[in-house]
Image (tube, rainbow, N blue to C red):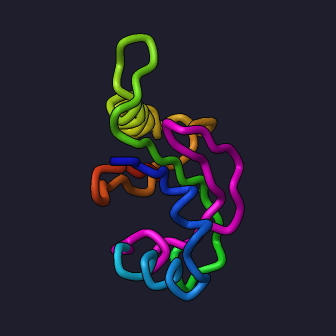
C-alpha cells in the first residue's frame, strides 16, 4: 500500500475540497484567533503575528507539533516551559505579556 504525504494529497484536491477539510477540523485556531503573517515555520512548529477575531491588536502566536524533539526535550514541552517562564517574569517591563495558551488536537499554542 502506498502512503502519500498530505502535500501530495492536497495537490490532487480542488480548492473547495481543501477549504471544506480545513473548516471541518478548525476549532479555536482561525475562528477565534486569526493569523495575519507567518514569521517562522519549520516541521516542529511555527510563529505567527495574529489577532483575536474582532480586534486589530496584534500579538505573537507560537505553536508546537507533537512528535518533534530538540536536545531530548519534546518541542511541545519546551513551548509549555516557555509559557510558564513568561508568566513568572511578567513583573519585569522588558518581558512580553502572557495572553493565553491552549491545545487543539495535538498541537500546543502559546500567545
Residue 51: quadrant of the picture? bottom right
| Residue 2, x across and y down, in percent | 40, 48
The residue depicted at 68 percent of the width and 68 percent of the height is 36
Question: Compared with residue 72, is residue 50 higher up or lower down, i.e. above or below?
Answer: below
Name the residue nearer the viewer: 15 or 101. 15
Residue occupying the far front of the picture: 1
**Is the magenta region chiefly helix, strand or loop?**
strand
Residue occupying the far top of the picture: 71
Question: Compared with residue 85, is residue 52 higher up or lower down, i.e. above or below?
Answer: below
The residue depicted at 57 percent of the width and 44 percent of the height is 96
Q: Is residue 41 rendered magenta in the image?
A: yes
Is residue 105 left or right of 109 when viewed as pictured?
left
| Residue 20, x across and y down, in percent | 45, 85
Name the residue nearer the viewer: 82 or 30. 30
Residue 93: quadrant of the picture? top right
Number of marks in the image? 0
Whether residue 92 can be seen here: yes
Question: Compared with residue 31, is residue 2 higher up or lower down, i.e. above or below?
Answer: above
| Residue 43, x across and y down, in percent | 54, 38
Magenta span covers which residues? Answer: 26-51
| Residue 75, x across and y down, in percent | 41, 30
Whether residue 88 can be seen here: no
The residue depicted at 44 percent of the width and 56 percent of the height is 99
Name the residue nearer the viewer: 81 or 108. 108
Question: Compared with residue 37, is residue 71 higher up or lower down, i.e. above or below?
Answer: above
Q: Is residue 30 rendered magenta in the image?
A: yes
Amino acid at each position: 500500500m502506498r502512503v502519500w504525504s498530505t502535500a501530495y494529497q492536497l495537490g490532487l484536491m480542488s480548492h473547495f475540497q481543501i477549504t471544506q477539510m480545513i473548516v471541518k477540523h478548525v476549532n479555536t485556531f482561525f475562528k477565534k484567533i486569526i493569523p495575519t503573517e507567518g514569521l517562522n515555520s519549520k516541521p516542529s512548529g511555527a510563529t505567527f503575528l495574529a489577532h483575536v477575531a474582532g480586534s486589530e491588536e496584534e500579538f505573537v502566536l507560537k505553536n508546537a507539533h507533537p512528535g518533534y524533539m530538540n536536545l531530548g526535550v519534546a518541542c511541545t514541552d519546551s513551548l509549555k516551559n516557555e509559557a510558564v517562564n513568561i508568566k513568572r517574569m511578567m513583573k519585569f517591563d522588558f518581558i512580553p505579556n502572557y495572553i493565553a495558551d491552549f491545545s487543539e488536537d495535538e498541537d500546543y499554542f502559546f500567545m
